[in-house]
Amino acid sequence: MPTADPESSRSHVLLIPSYNTGAKVLETVQEALRHWVPVWVVVDGSTDGSGDALAKLADDNPRLRVLSLPENEGKGAAVLFGIRTAEAEGFTHALTMDADGQHPANLVRAFMETSARHPDRMILGNPRFDDSAPGLRVNGRRISNFWANLETLWAGIGDSLFGFRVYPIIPLRKVMEGTRWARRFDFDPEVAVRLCWSGVRPLNIPAPCRYFTTAEGGVSQFRYVRDNALLTWMHARLVCGFVVRSPRLLWQRLTRQ
């Protein structure tokens, strides 16, 4: 069981991007604080009052920090803002966790400890869905997973869309600053592919994922047509990038073995 007041890490920060997630983000943050310190929330231009509620919570809890963007820029943009701030303050790794309560806060410490043992790797959650998961979402992500693995010569990305991950901050910042994309729903799959291209290998850990109903306070920003169109365009771009990089990726694979 986690301690009531875990010791604050100076290398690994838990980063939660949040946009209009209502009261659910407060539950998520409070649960996260039971398992890790520090916890940072990047409020991505929220207009539902959750930013004010988080700021009030942070006033009473020095283990929590709230950063704010004036307008909604997307998950990837919020993460980039957070990791730039974290890097400037000496942090080397960041675990990203969704604000909607889907991700398992009780596994934060295990993921962070795995990252500490393998600091050059990205630690990817490999989701285990229960009956709450919409079948369309579960089946649809298999398409993205296929393309992500093709684009990396099957480097080992277990799930391209699951955002419960630990990233080494400097490589993540560099790949994000090297592209104008990966700022919205395309963030998770695109950075996983680009990090593989840059030589950061994935390490997968199973993690349960729960979808909450509206009655349970669940909030989703996923828009089926808009976001699937974004993913389609993203994979079209990445396939082109893969074709250019494939000789080097193949050489890296052969020499690594």
Image: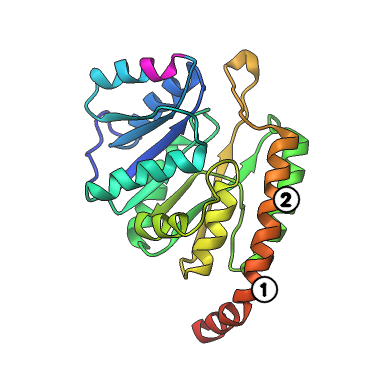
**Position of 97 relative to 212 (above/below):** below
**Position of 155 relative to 108 (above/below):** below
Q: Residues within 10 Å of mark 1 (few under 14, many from 20)?
A: few
Residues rendered magenta in the picture? 49-53
Q: Main secondary structure of the magenta part?
A: helix
The answer to whether residue 198 shows anywhere in this view is yes
- The quadrant in which residue 29 appears is top left
- The quadrant in which residue 217 appears is top right
Q: Is residue 24 left or right of residue 2?
A: right
Q: Earlier in the sequence, mark 1 or mark 2?
A: 2
- The quadrant in which residue 52 appears is top left
| Cα–Cα gap, marks 1 and 2 | 17 Å
Which corner quadrant holds the N terminus? top left
The residue labelled by disc 1 is: 243
The answer to whether residue 153 shows anywhere in this view is no
Of residue 248 and residue 99, the one placed in the foreground of this image is 248
Q: Is residue 167 left or right of residue 6?
A: right
Q: Position of residue 98 (x, y in %)?
A: 50, 35
Q: Residues within 10 Å of mark 2 (few under 14, many from 20)?
A: some
Coloring scheme used: rainbow
The residue labelled by disc 2 is: 232
Of residue 113 and residue 186, the one placed in the foreground of this image is 186
**Could you tell me which residue is drawn at 32 percent across and 43 percent down?**
13
**Could you tell me which residue is drawn at 71 percent across and 47 percent down?**
141
